[in-house]
Image (cartoon, grey):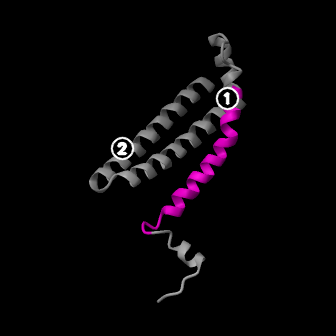
Amino acid sequence: MRILTDRKRAEGLGAAHRGTEHHWNMIVSSSALIGLVPLFVFTVGAAIGRPYDEVIAYFQRPFPAIVAVLTLLVGFIHFRHGVQVLIEDYTGGLTRKVLIICMICLSYAAAAIGLFAIARVAL
């Protein structure tokens, strides 16, 4: 019988050898979103109800554009990791692989479209 300390057991990272990495990514991205989402709401909230030209001029300033880009990127990274864990927990085999590939492509495509839209307005 092998005697393992808690640290040695944790170094194995579980059966898939990736569980701790997923958990850590979710903790980091959710911590970033705790600060970014309220900042995003207050930044975008200042532009709500204004005429189109004023909104475009508002988002051409660096701070609102940077806040929007950071919130978008961190949000989609958090989405990707969360949905991947969900798929891994509830599906198996080829279905799991196909769904994970589709979900990763969908999240990167949506993030790219969002970044393009923000860049188009900001530049």
* Residue of label 1: 41
Q: Quadrant of residue 70?
A: top right
Residue beneath the point at 62% across and 37% down: 71
Is 83 rendered above or below residue 17?
above
Q: Earlier in the sequence, mark 2 or mark 1?
A: 1
Which residue reaches farthest left?
A: 94
Element at label 2: helix
Is 36 rendered above or below residue 21?
above
Position of residue 97 in the picture relative to residue 73 (left or right): left
Residue 52, percent from left and from top:
62, 12
Q: Callout 1, which amino acid? A: Val
Q: Is residue 47 magenta?
A: no
* Residue of label 2: 102
Q: How many residues crowd mark 2 within 10 Å: few (<14), some (14–19), many (20+)?
A: few
Q: Which residues are magenta?
A: 15-43
The front one of 64 and 76 is 76
Q: Callout 2, which amino acid? A: Cys
Element at label 1: helix
Residue 42, percent from left and from top:
71, 27
Residue 113, percent from left and from top:
48, 32
In terms of secondary structure, what is the magenta stretch mainly? helix
